[in-house]
Amino acid sequence: MMRREWIYAWLLVLPAFVFLITFTHLPAVEALVNSVWTTAKGRRPSMFVGLGNYQKMLQDPIFIKAMINSGLYAALTVPTSIALALAMALLVHRPFKGVAAMRMAYFTPTVLPLVAVANIWLFFYAPGFGLIDQIRQFFGFASANYAGQPDTALYSVAVVTIWKEAGFFMIFFLAALQTVPETLREAAAIEGCSKWTFFRRVTLPLIMPTTLFVSVNAVINAFRLVDHVFVMTKGGPDNASMLLLYYIFETGFRYWDTAYAAALTVVLILILSLAGLGQFYAADKRVHYK
Amino acid sequence: MQISDIAIQIDRVTRAFDRNRALDEVSVPIRAGEFTVLLGPSGCGKSTLLRLIAGLDTQTDGTILIEGQDMRGTPPGARGLSMVFQSYALFPHLSVRQNILFGLAVRKTSRAVQAERLKRVAEMMGLGPLLDRKPSQLSGGQQQRVALARAVISDRPICLMDEPLSNLDAKLRADMRVELRSIQKQLGLTVVYVTHDQVEAMTMADRIIVMNGGRIEQVGIPEAIYARPETTFTASFIGTPPMNLFPASALFSGPANLTVGIRPEDLHLTDAGPRADLVGVEYLGADRLVAGQINGTPFVLRQPAQSPTPRDRFHIGWSQTAMNAFDATTGKRLHDFDFSSLSPNQKDFDHETA
């Protein structure tokens, strides 16, 4: 009887398993294998180099630049988009006239394709006639090329990410806020508890599981979401907005150094796994699960 | 009655939701130090009234005075009252201790006062060993105690309770009724208690406010509500089973526009009197409920279980003083109605149906 149930269970997960292994696990293992070999060239077959590709990274200034940028980019986009998402969710979580339209407005950036909106943002940033520049010039400031200057390129890319992500995360916070029972709010009101105190002492702890879920996703997305980099800066100028994943793409598919790209990929997977695990462990003690 | 005796004065309060009136010009005083029960079926407006007193909702019209002060615009926290919710409304992420102290903490009461009051209240409620647990680790009864402790520790003179016992099992509910009542007396609290359970109302209340359809049907001590219902609604709502309501024509050859109410325990079997048909018998241990029909009107008679079960047809009798007279059209009690003006029904149901 037990055996039959097990066979049944395995058969049920089999389709998902096949896809997961073919497109996720096998490629990851293959990347790991490839990373310890050199890229095969026309004249020279692939040869084993052990950790050679990884040693190469330490001397690669673009890799180091990309790592710093990615860290900065995550540190900028993750907390900002989460805070913004929570603020927006709080604004539209109670029903009022036109709340559906408001929610839709907040959610729109999520629905739009990132490549398309990156082009629109490019217009906002455009020097001379761009939206931001027009405002600047109206107030008498000098023209600025946000996406085209090394010192602002990364930030202008980060702003687009925040704009894109906040609306998506808002949905999760909205769902979490709806699960906080109204009677808790009323019980607190009877005690003379201010809205802010209630938010800090009750709402925030109760939506902690969602905050954790969202922050893990935000960190992953910070390393994963680079569509707009292709459109807006292509990692430039002078690698000012070079992110790790974009660098992997450039190495693998522009310069066809697939072995080095594989090694970079392994580093990326390692960072993401550590970030995810670390967050779960660190937050586990402070998170309230019902 | 002096003004100071009244803790809460409800004055022509209306609460309308769209076109539907949940409360319709309700006026009633609630006396200080009394256990007042708002009793009525679902949707009668009792919870709405409680929420208006609490300030969790705002009336469409009318005034609510607490200790003589108009409460319009006063937030719930500044009304000098505490509240116990049906769902307990405990904060799931806080310990029992933090839950009880929540109000004192947000009002920034000194640590020393908090500790002293917590000790006293935890002792009174028997919560001492549970203080470090989370609500999810407590039974329903224990959670209810925590909710109660949170209300009591505030030291506020008025405590509102919204069906606080309805999520407990029958045994626990009976125990908690006694305990609630003793806490109320001990602390001299003014309690306003909402329930649809008349047993709770009867056993705990100093005064019952019977509500129906957004209006107050009757206000009185439990004995008065039971013995002298002011309306046919109260008569048919209070008592298990409730008062029998006969059209006068079923019992008397008298005026048609009269309803006669007689409690099941005031009816007895006799050799003469109106004839009834037996419908069914329910054995309850000490008592037996006999369901019958008299000239098409169903009724229930309560008799001691030792008495003989009636035959298929039987005669019923009652004492003159057990009768209640109501206007058949308005359902209002007719005070000082003279039953001697009526003559017993001479209609011979025996031969008619034979």
Image (cartoon, rainbow, N blue to C red):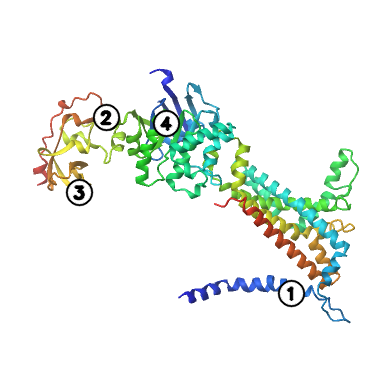
Mark 1 residue crowding within 10 angstroms, few (<14) / some (14–19) / many (20+): few
Q: What element carries label 2?
A: loop
Viewer can see residue A73: yes
Return the residue nearer the eye: B117 or B38: B117
Q: Residue B228: which disc?
A: 2
Q: Residue A218's spot in the image, x, y percent?
A: 70, 55
Mark 2 residue crowding within 10 angstroms, few (<14) / some (14–19) / many (20+): some
- First reached walking from the N terminus: tag 3 or tag 2: 2
x 52%, y 26%: residue: B71
x 26%, y 41%: residue: B241
Q: Are marks 1 and 4 in contact (CB under 8 Å)?
A: no
Q: In this view, does A109 lie to the left or right of B256?
A: right
Q: Is mark 4 on a helix, strand or loop?
A: strand
The residue that disc 1 covers is: A30
Please determine if labels 1 and 4 lie on a single subunit: no
Q: Mark 2 lies on which chain?
A: B
The disc labelled 2 sits on which kind of residue? Arg
- Compared to residue B263, the image places residue B308 above or below, namely below
Q: Which chain carries label 1?
A: A
The disc labelled 4 sits on which kind of residue? Val
Return the residue nearer the eye: B201 or B181: B181
Q: Residue B329's spot in the image, x, y percent?
A: 28, 31
Q: Residue A278's spot in the image, x, y percent?
A: 69, 57
Give the foreground label among 1 and 3: 1
The residue that disc 4 covers is: B191
The residue that disc 3 covers is: B280
**Distance from Cα at disc 4 to Cα at disc 3:** 41 Å
Q: Residue A93's spot in the image, x, y percent?
A: 61, 44
**Distance from Cα at disc 4 to Cα at disc 2:** 24 Å
Residue that extends furthest to the top in the rendered view of this protein: B2
**Distance from Cα at disc 1 to Cα at disc 3:** 82 Å
